[in-house]
């Protein structure tokens, strides 16, 4: 028997002479871990069906441990959960961050040898066989410093007076804990910067402005808005965990941004592995496609063929529409984001419809011209039995209205909601259904990277009294934030429903320091400058991204990287997992993500467009530039290419 085990047995025998054998064995094993940076609080009068047997606090988080032969009934577990969350909620670390009740992990330890696969989810807690207990201490990456652990343990001991703090003397780490304990030597600054895994800084603590939203009761749809970097998605993920613990059935996290679901699913599995299998993370169009396939609805969406159909329709109508606006993309946006995006099905409705975000004013006669163009486009799709993404949403909305899901989602969270069409919002409202805490919309109008717009009230989603606005930027260091605030990105913004919002220009900064660099030159010079900067970067390449604004630019930059032998990964394939590859993609794929260092390359815009399209395009480029700049936490390099090069 190891020295730590011997001392544990002795201490437990003195403090708890009448313990049953199972609890004695489990507590002995946990107490032996306190030779390092772990703390144990044991219930003085266990067993108590309404309270956890023990709390374990260490580098990977806070755990409320139940020890029993069988699983607790629902009422007993709810009592254990309420007690733990209420007593521990509000613990603060040295930076003023707040430990939210949902940050506590609940674990049931049962006798036996287990299946060898580690923790198993059985509702809102894990089940660990006694022989698997060591996995509890190794399950996550370390994200709390020794200082934070000690602070939590001290405050928890004060709040949990019925628990006995237990810790044995320091000893040399044994072989199976040495790797874990070595990680504890990370400094507070290294951890707070979250240099390797950005979400880890938020696994246990939230800032005071955020934590109240996580557990707030909303009697209808709710909205979280605020500038980039204010932690909207972090709050949404913590809230998902809170709701999962208090409901049955599946939950849904969806977004219009294709890259976000996989990244946020990986974050959520670190945050709440015990309920992760109940939360579905999926891109909106992928969810719709699956629904329609399961219901035998044939929907053929082929982007290249849809573009061909649009081009043929444009050829037939360009002579009449070019005098109004020469850019074909302007009219494609009119169809995608106004006519079909708003679910308009008649010319009369189109004539009456608002066109929020559109500069060109159209009278009735002009709208009739656009409508005939739209009808030709629809005919061209029908000839090839094609649909576009708006059609997919429309068909799915009709399907859900006629036949709702047999099992409704307990809650639906929609991230980056500002880029979803109005028709998509109506579908998501139908999907969530009525009732408290069922629909949460998360977004920021200033980060809209697609043209057009709406108000939530246009979709019939009432949020009066249920809107939250976050104001403090926790992501970007001061120098990076200051650089991003220079962009004229419609700095007078609303909160997604017409009320005054908070623009990035008015956001408060929480992190000092940072570094920015600006460069301007030819495409030929870009190769030398960019490669030199990448190769001389002190930040890990795996925590660095290269962002561009158009697919053409993406082709040019990836060719350059490939020739230079720099390993890179398309943002389309990024899942949030750690690697040593530069992440590369357009701003549309970078939305919602963040990296320690970001390189932005801006090529000249060559497409001939008219006055209205240019004005809208300038506004859109400002918003897209803001999004690109705010992806950087510590370092931002902004390169402007002045010509196309050879």
Image: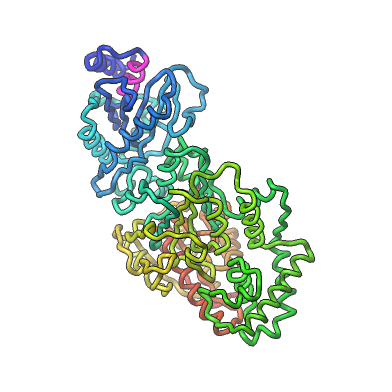
**Which residues are drawn in magenta?**
22-31
Residue closest to the eye, 629 or 599 = 629
Q: Say how the picture is coloured.
A: rainbow
Residue furthest to the right = 383
Residue closest to the eye, 287 or 507 = 287
Q: Residue 172's x, y, as percent?
A: 29, 25
Quarter of image, res 379: bottom right
Give above or below for 217 relative to 160. below
Query: Can the viewer see residue 301 in this picture?
Result: yes
Q: What residue do we see at 23% from left, 27% from top?
A: 162
**Any magenta on residue 392?**
no
Q: Residue 345's x, y, as percent?
A: 65, 69
Query: Can the viewer see residue 600 in this picture?
Result: no
Q: Residue 550's x, y, as percent?
A: 57, 68
Q: How many marks?
A: 0
Q: What residue do we see at 40% from left, 42% from top?
A: 242
Q: Residue 365's x, y, as percent?
A: 64, 85
Give above or below for 631 relative to 9. below
Give above or below for 474 relative to 576. below
Which quadrant, please, contains the N terminus? top left
Which quadrant, please, contains the C terminus? bottom right
Q: What residue do we see at 33% from left, 46% from top?
A: 191
Residue closest to the eye, 303 or 415 = 415
**Any magenta on residue 27?**
yes
Q: What residue do we see at 37% from left, 48% from top?
A: 217
């Amino acid at each position: 028997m190891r020295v730590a085990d011997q001392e544990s047995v002795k201490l437990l025998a003195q403090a708890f002479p009448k313990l049953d054998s199972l609890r004695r064995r489990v507590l002995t094993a946990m107490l032996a871990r306190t030779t390092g940076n772990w703390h144990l609080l044991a219930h003085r009068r266990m067993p108590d069906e309404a309270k956890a047997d023990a709390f374990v606090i260490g580098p990977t988080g806070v755990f409320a441990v139940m020890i029993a032969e069988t699983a607790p009934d629902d009422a007993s577990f709810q009592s254990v959960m309420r007690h733990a969350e209420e007593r521990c909620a509000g613990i603060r670390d040295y930076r003023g961050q707040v430990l939210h009740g949902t940050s506590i992990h609940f674990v049931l330890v049962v006798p036996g040898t287990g299946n060898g696969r580690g923790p198993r989810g059985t509702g809102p807690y894990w089940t660990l066989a006694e022989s698997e207990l060591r996995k509890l201490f190794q399950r996550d990456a370390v994200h709390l410093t020794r200082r934070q652990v000690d602070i939590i343990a001290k405050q928890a001991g004060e709040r949990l007076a019925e628990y006995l703090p237990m810790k044995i003397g320091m000893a040399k780490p044994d072989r199976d804990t040495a790797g874990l304990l070595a990680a504890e030597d990370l400094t507070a600054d290294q951890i707070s910067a979250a240099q390797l895994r950005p979400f880890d800084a938020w696994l246990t603590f939230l800032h005071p402005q955020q934590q109240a939203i996580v557990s707030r009761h909303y009697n209808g749809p709710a909205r979280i808005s605020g500038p980039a970097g204010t932690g909207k998605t972090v709050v949404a993920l913590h809230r998902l965990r809170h709701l999962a613990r208090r409901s049955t059935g599946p939950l849904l996290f969806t977004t219009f941004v294709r890259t976000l679901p996989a990244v946020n699913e990986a974050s959520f599995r670190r945050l709440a592995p015990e309920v992760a299998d109940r939360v579905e993370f999926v891109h909106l169009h992928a969810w719709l496609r699956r629904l329609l396939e399961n219901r035998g609805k044939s929907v053929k969406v082929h982007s290249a063929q849809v573009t061909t159909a649009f081009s043929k329709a444009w050829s037939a109508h360009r002579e009449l529409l070019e005098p109004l606006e020469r850019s074909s993309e302007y009219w494609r946006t009119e169809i995608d984001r106004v006519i079909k995006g708003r679910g308009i099905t008649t010319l009369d409705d189109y004539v009456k419809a608002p066109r929020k975000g559109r500069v060109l004013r159209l009278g009735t006669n002009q709208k009739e011209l656009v409508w005939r163009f739209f009808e030709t486009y629809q005919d061209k799709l029908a000839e090839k039995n094609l649909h576009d993404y708006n059609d997919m949403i429309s068909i799915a909305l009709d399907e859900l209205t006629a036949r709702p899901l047999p099992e409704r989602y307990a809650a639906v969270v929609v991230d980056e909601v500002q880029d979803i069409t109005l028709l998509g919002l109506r579908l998501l409202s139908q999907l969530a259904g009525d009732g408290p805490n069922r629909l949460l919309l998360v977004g920021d109008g200033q980060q809209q990277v697609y043209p057009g717009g709406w108000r939530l009230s246009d979709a019939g989603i009432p949020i009066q009294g249920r809107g939250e606005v976050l104001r403090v930027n926790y992501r970007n260091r001061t120098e990076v934030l200051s650089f991003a605030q220079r962009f004229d990105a419609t700095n007078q913004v609303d909160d997604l429903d017409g009320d005054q919002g908070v623009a990035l220009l008015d956001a408060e900064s929480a992190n000092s320091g940072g570094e920015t660099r600006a460069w301007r030159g030819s495409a030929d010079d870009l190769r030398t400058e960019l490669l030199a900067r990448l190769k001389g970067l002190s930040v890990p390449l795996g925590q660095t991204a290269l962002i561009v604004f158009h697919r053409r630019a993406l082709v040019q930059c990836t060719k350059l990287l490939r020739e230079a032998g720099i390993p890179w990964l398309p943002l389309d394939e990024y899942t949030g997992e750690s690697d040593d590859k530069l992440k590369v993609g357009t701003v549309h794929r970078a939305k919602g993500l963040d990296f320690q260092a970001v390189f932005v390359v801006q090529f000249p815009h060559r497409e001939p467009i008219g006055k209205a399209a240019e004005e809208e395009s300038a506004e859109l480029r400002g918003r897209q530039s803001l999004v690109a700049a705010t992806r950087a936490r510590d370092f931002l390099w902004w390169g402007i290419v002045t010509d196309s090069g050879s």
